[in-house]
Amino acid sequence: MTDTAAAVNAPSPMEPSMYRVTARDVESHDTVTLTLAPMADALPAPNPGQFFMLWAFGIGEAPISVAGVTADGSIVHTIRAVGAVTDALVALRPGDPVGMRGPYGTSWPVDAAAGADVLVVAGGLGLAPVRPVIDAIAADPSRFRSRRVLIGARTPGALLYPGASARWESQGVAVQRIVDRAGPDWTGPVGLITKLIEQSTLSEHTHAFLCGPEPMMRFSAMALIDQGVPPEQIWVSLERNMHCAYGHCGHCQLGSLFVCRDGPIVSWAAAQAVVRIPQR
């Protein structure tokens, strides 16, 4: 086959691979976790922090971060219904087909934190993209000096993965939770997640992984810097307007970055330089 013929027959980068829903776990009234297995050839295994484009047939596609990979290689995604595509994805049931392409983007630099203190800060649905980080540090405690996870949500009912949180604690990870508004059965702290950061003992030996709403990440990063954590060791997930996922359409351009290609995981130092976020 000639090079020209090979190019003509090459699959389009926009062509999804066929996967099937094998499990569906309801997290809340508008959020589910789907486990997806390949119907033919599997896509490459993702690194923590990367994302796939999920295709709801007849509706469209959306970027969804990876919340985990099972022992048999199935991909786990936690999805909240916030629009037509995600509404359709959340409505899928076991046995339903879904299109996938990827993985795309940069990943959390967990290996760079070896021998250091690890702090994971997650707000709301932001717990999903950092779940692989927590699984990694929970499974290999000897690699890190300390392991701490701070989880925030609007209400107790919005806290994701209660079973996984209990498992992380059983593996020696210090897990703290805080909510904006307490319910009748809530006995934990109430307030912003920065409250937990300010109560933590941190230093230049801390590597922090942040994911959640942008205001939460901004104020969390500022609180971490106040305690001596270098901006280069604070990592955030920027997920903005990703459409094509390989830097072609330009919808996700943020300053000099294409978030789908140069992110979504970037250091706070890089994020601040691009969007010119003031320290105060």
Image (cartoon, rainbow, N blue to C red):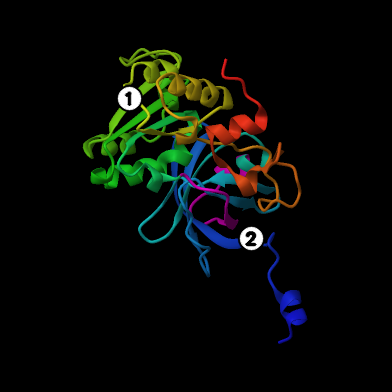
Q: What residue is at 77 percent from the left and 80 percent from the top?
A: 4
Kindly tell me whether residue 91 is visible in this rendering: no
- Label 2 Cα neighbours within 10 Å, binned few <14 / some 14-19 / many ≥20: some
Are the residues at dot 1 and dot 2 in contact (C-beta closer than 8 Å)? no
The answer to whether residue 179 is left or right of residue 91 is left
- 119 up-or-down from 196: above or below: below
Q: What residue is at 52 percent from the left and 26 percent from the top?
A: 217
- 125 up-or-down from 228: above or below: below
* Residue in front for this viewpoint, 29 or 64: 64
What span is in magenta? Answer: 87-108
What residue type is disc 1 on?
Answer: Gln
What residue type is disc 2 on?
Answer: Pro
The answer to whether residue 81 is left or right of residue 119 is right
Mark linked to residue 176? 1
Residue pointed to by mark 2: 16
As for residue 80 lying within the magenta part, the answer is no
The quadrant of the picture occupied by the C terminus is: top right
